[in-house]
């Protein structure tokens, strides 16, 4: 029996579970802690800014830690849009991608189920269990484009740091990916929730039964992820790069290029 899909699938389950449990959970925890203080417009403004930073860091740290932990096992997708990017660039077998998608959505639903059990109904209802949503004045088309752009950045960074063998920062790809998530939430969190991930949206939506404009958080990330993967793969991974020394030729010393390991 081939246990490789199981090993990879479990890694994807744990990583995606952590993202939803910590990310959506941070929203619910902040709402629980700050709800008594939200009695005026100035207070809402101050605490709203604090909430944004905390939620952005929670999502980014969850991804950075889990990507560093199991990236060598499954590639640390934790996101159906990322997996789609690897499918369209033929970097993962479709049968394995189905395993990834199944585990990602199952993990998101499981994490949301635990959050639903932990928090009282008043808090769950206030934040729709951490499900993403459109802010007032943001249309579905604006929200769609925001999710496309933010997911494009995310998948672009994943390909540049984790998929590209010449990536200068491959050894710390988890940190770069986590910071990209943090960056996206800081910009898009107040506008769309900045899910950038269909699984991150699915779990809380399913358990809170909140499906308003839900297609935005599926179409947007899938489109943005596929575009980024195809663009990076076409521009940088399919083109053979010349192998040239960094040091002056007359010295006879070939210095390591970025991404190479120095040989002593």
Image (cartoon, grey):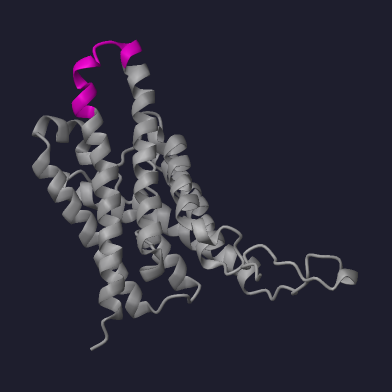
Q: Quadrant of the N terminus?
A: bottom left
Tell whether 114 sits left or right of 102: left
Q: Residue at x 46, y 66 (%)?
A: 85
Residue 140 figure quarter: top left
The residue positioned farthest toward the right in the image shown = 250
Q: Is residue 175 above or below residue 248?
A: above
Q: Nearer the viewer, residue 73 or 26?
A: 73
Q: State the image coordinates of residue 210 (x, y, percent, origin top left).
A: 20, 43
Q: Bounds of the magenta span?
A: 31-43
Residue 16 figure quarter: bottom left
Tell whether 162 sits left or right of 241: left
Q: Residue at x 22, y 28 (%)?
A: 31
Q: State the image coordinates of residue 41 (x, y, percent, origin top left).
A: 32, 12
Q: Is 200 contained in the magenta span?
A: no
Predominant SS of the magenta segment: helix
Q: Residue at x 67, y 74 (%)?
A: 239
Instruction: Examine the rendering and report whether any part of residue 131 can be seen.
Output: no
Q: Nearer the viewer, residue 142 or 126?
A: 126
Q: Is residue 173 above or below residue 142?
A: below
Q: Residue at x 24, y 12 (%)?
A: 39
Q: Quadrant of the C terminus?
A: bottom right
């Amino acid at each position: 029996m081939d246990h490789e899909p199981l090993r990879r699938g479990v890694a994807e389950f744990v990583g995606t579970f952590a993202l939803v449990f910590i990310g959506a959970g941070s929203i619910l925890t902040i709402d629980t802690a700050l709800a008594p203080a939200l009695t005026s417009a100035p207070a809402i403004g101050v605490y709203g800014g604090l909430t944004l930073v905390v939620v952005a860091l929670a999502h980014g740290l969850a991804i950075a830690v889990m990507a560093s932990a199991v990236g060598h096992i499954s590639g640390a997708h934790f996101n159906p849009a990322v997996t789609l990017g690897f499918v369209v660039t033929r970097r993962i077998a479709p049968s394995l991608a189905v395993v990834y998608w199944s585990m990602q959505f199952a993990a998101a639903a499981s994490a949301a189920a635990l959050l639903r059990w932990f928090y009282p109904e008043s808090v769950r209802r206030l934040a729709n269990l951490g499900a993403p949503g459109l802010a007032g004045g943001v249309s579905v088309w604006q929200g769609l484009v925001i999710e496309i752009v933010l997911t494009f950045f995310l998948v672009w960074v994943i390909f540049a740091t984790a998929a590209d063998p010449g990536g200068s920062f491959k050894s710390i790809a988890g940190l770069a990916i986590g910071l990209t998530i943090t960056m996206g939430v800081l910009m898009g969190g107040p506008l769309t929730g900045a899910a950038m991930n269909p699984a991150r949206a699915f779990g809380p939506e399913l358990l809170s039964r909140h499906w308003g404009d839900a297609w935005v958080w599926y179409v947007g990330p899938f489109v943005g992820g596929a575009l980024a993967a195809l663009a990076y793969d076409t521009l940088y991974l399919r083109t053979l790069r010349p192998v040239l020394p960094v040091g002056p030729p007359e010295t006879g010393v070939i210095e390591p290029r970025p991404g190479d390991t120095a040989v002593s």
